[in-house]
Amino acid sequence: MQQPIWNNLTPAFRREIEVRNSLTLAKLTPSVVTYQVPNRQLAIDWEHVILLKYCPGGSSRRGATIIWNAHVGFVSTDVSPITLIDRLEQVSPVTWQDMQAYTDISQGRRPLSYVLGPLQLIPIEQKKSQYSWLNGRYVQTINPMTLLLQEKQAMVALKPGPEVLVQDSAERLTGKWKLTNKIRRLQQINREYNNELYGSHYLVNVQVPPELLKFRRRVQYLTVLYLEKRLPVSWTADEMNEIIDEARHNASWPLDDLGPLEED
């Protein structure tokens, strides 16, 4: 893994962090970033994103973002981090509903992280309703910092060397980091299962891993729950399970006739 670089920072700020190879996230503001890209011209190399730093204010009511990329350095743009992640989610095979299901079966809690293979975005440093996001792929260790008269802080050591001082609880960050690693493993199980399934001549002998089956049922449950909240219906837990089972087999329940399909 490449050593993260400090490119595109003002000379004074770069000298300050290079002395200890350590970044205090609270000091990272658009004023110390020398490279700005307008939202509509932005293309993100998600594979090498280390950090999305939320910056309140700016031209957008939802704030701005500083992106730290391991290969490029720092760049700021006039849109919030969650907007950038939402765009990725819209074109990704992993949806926010998937992330809710992964989190639920892993006994995790909100706010949701976003995991897409090696990209493990962990929400950190909440500012009102917004977060900054740290890629757990680059995390090596997380240690608490107990400075007098300071809020909860954590020193995050990155691979292979730099450190980032974060205004957040080390306990919370460690829990989120472990959760994203667990979710990534579940995604790997899904990929391995699909490789085995579609590469086998004996499909009946390919068993669905228990973790994957639990994930699938949770996604289906969340879909039914979403519909229940938006339709004039009220289902019991048993009825919801029955709906899920019937839907998996494309059976018409609870309606007897779904009606004819519309012709093209």
Image (tube, rainbow, N blue to C red):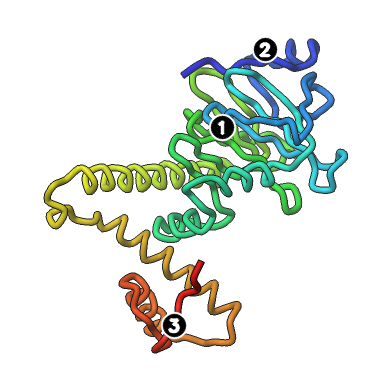
**Residue 68 location, x and y as percent?**
65, 26
Secondary structure category for the residue under label 2: helix
Q: Residue at x 73, y 16 (%)?
A: 8
Query: Of marks 3 and 1, which one's residue comes earlier in the chain?
Result: 1
Secondary structure category for the residue under label 3: loop
Amino acid bearing label 1: Trp
Residue tagged 2: 18
Q: Residue at x 55, y 53 (%)?
A: 112
Q: CA distance from mark 1 to mark 2?
A: 25 Å
Amino acid bearing label 3: Leu
- In the visual, does 38 lie left or right of 133? right
Residue tagged 3: 258
Check the image and name the residue furthest to the front: 264
Question: Would you identify the image quadrant in which residue 135 lies?
Answer: top right
**Residue 57 location, x and y as percent?**
85, 42
Q: CA distance from mark 2 to mark 3?
A: 65 Å
Question: Would you identify the image quadrant in which residue 16 lies?
Answer: top right
Q: Is residue 201 above or below residue 4?
A: below
Query: Of marks 2 and 3, which one's residue comes earlier in the chain?
Result: 2
